[in-house]
Image (spheres, rainbow, N blue to C red):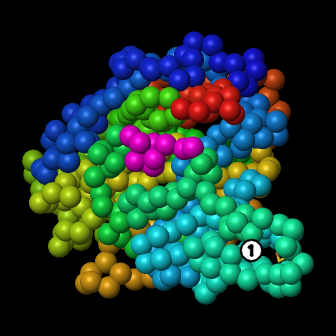
Amino acid sequence: MAVTDRPGIRPGDTPTPTDLGPRSQGPSAQEIIAGDRVPPPSTLLIESQLDLGTDDIPVERYTSRAFHDLEVDRMWKRVWQVAAREDDLPRVGDTVVYDLADMSFLLVRSAPDTIRAFYNACLHRGTQLRDRSGYAPELRCPFHGWTWNLDGTIKSVPCHWDFAHLDQAGFNLPEAKAATWGGWVFVNPDPDAISLSDYLGSFPEHFVWDTARRYKSLHVSKLLRVNWKACLEAFMESYHVIATHPQILTYLGDANTQYDVFPGTGPGRPGWNRMNTLSGVSSPHLGYTPSEEDILAAQLASYGQDPIPVPPGETARRVLAEATRQVYTPKPASIPGDELSDSEAIDNILYYVFPNFQPWGGVSPINYRFRPNGNDPDSCVMDVMFLSDYAGDDKPPSAKVTQLGFDDDWTEVEALGTLAMVFNQDTGNLPRVQRGLHATRKRGVSLGRYQESRIRQIHHELDYWINRPPAEKE
Ligand code: FES
Ligand SMILES: [Fe+2]
């Protein structure tokens, strides 16, 4: 099985909306949500699945340098990807360096309303113009001092007389495309790329939380010994909860998670997906139903909080949602509607935008981003960014990046709180996944039809890009 050859659904095919068949025992997420006191935004009442086949995913996609190179040339160099928050560059002259594989981009706020993404390389002998984010009144190469204005026009060349043989018009810095959505800055290296808005398709209509109104309160960037796709895929299903996080089964509807896969609107316009894993209900895996008091007490204990009673006729879920709503009173500005719904208050609502962006919905501040670590198919960079609401009119500054190396533990970041232990459980598996992918004699990774449908969609989109010839234009 070649890495580009996956029979069944062809790259660029429009998949068929479908019902993927069997689901877990116990009530569905929608049946549980129907009992909530405050119903969620209508987008969370929709279900969507696509028939993307059942083939195994070739193991080489996670382990081979040749596939990594293909992925960089055919996918990463042609897709919109999150590079920064707009608030990371608040002033004219602020810069952010965004590196991916061999690529390096220098994001610059060149005017109050303009962020540009320059190729981060000097036009003289190639030196990276900046190797870190920060303020720069002009873009000056550290080697011989060629200098550019913030809009990328050439400003000065020492001993200019010695370069009379060069075309001066070609001295302006080349740019990648840059655009914003939700307070995020996306870049796309392809000069012929479709607009970010076309690329995102129906995703912004469904992702109703106004994250542009939030500020970045935490940013942790961690190196992990696993392929970037295997890493992001570990955050795209709740199937792993039973083995990886058994301590949370008392209060998490893992097996009755709702997974939704939405189609793109045409070739090069990727689909997107999401899941909603409900809180305040017990796992169908438990084999018994804990009392509502026990469910609530276990969930509160996980936050370090004391139990609160569940009045007769009430449920743990409704009491937890009400208590959480009180914490988020007045309603945060980023939450739509008149009242914070139960699901937005307490559930685990995760979205995915191809190739590597995972924002949570509801009140959760969490966002993930994943990239290869340089050109190593066996390691990656995972960014965890918290976006938080704030009181008053003055937006707090974006948090600085905390770097964690391969062997640093998430618990070193105090602000992660109890999440650090969950991340340790999640990422603790991953070096073993990568080792096993190299060691296996099985040629493909097998996926559950429903619970791993979001992972299948990644590979469906990847199929399109790696099979699209380099010269083809839309
Ligand atoms: S390499 Fe940049 S000025 Fe010489
Ligand atoms: Fe997990």
In the image: residue 118, left or right of residue 364? right
In the image: residue 343, left or right of residue 107? left
Give the image location of residue 474, x and y in percent: 54, 32
In the image: residue 407, left or right of residue 202? right
The N terminus appears in which quarter of the rendering? top right
Query: Which image quarter: residue 154?
Result: bottom right
Mark 1 within 8 Å of ligand 1, using the beta carbon: yes
Query: Which image quarter: residue 108?
Result: bottom right
Q: Residue at x 21, y 33 (%)?
A: 31
* For residue 433, above or below residue 328: above
Q: Residue at x 23, y 69 (%)?
A: 333
Q: Could one spot residue 436 in this view of the protein?
A: no
Q: Could one spot residue 212 in this view of the protein?
A: yes
Q: Can you name the residue that lies furthest to the top here?
A: 8
Give the image location of residue 322, x and y in percent: 17, 60
Compare residues 123 and 375 and report the one nearer the observer.
Answer: 123
Provide the residue designation for mark 1: 129
Q: Which residues are magenta?
A: 192-201
Compare residues 215 and 137 and report the one nearer the observer.
Answer: 137
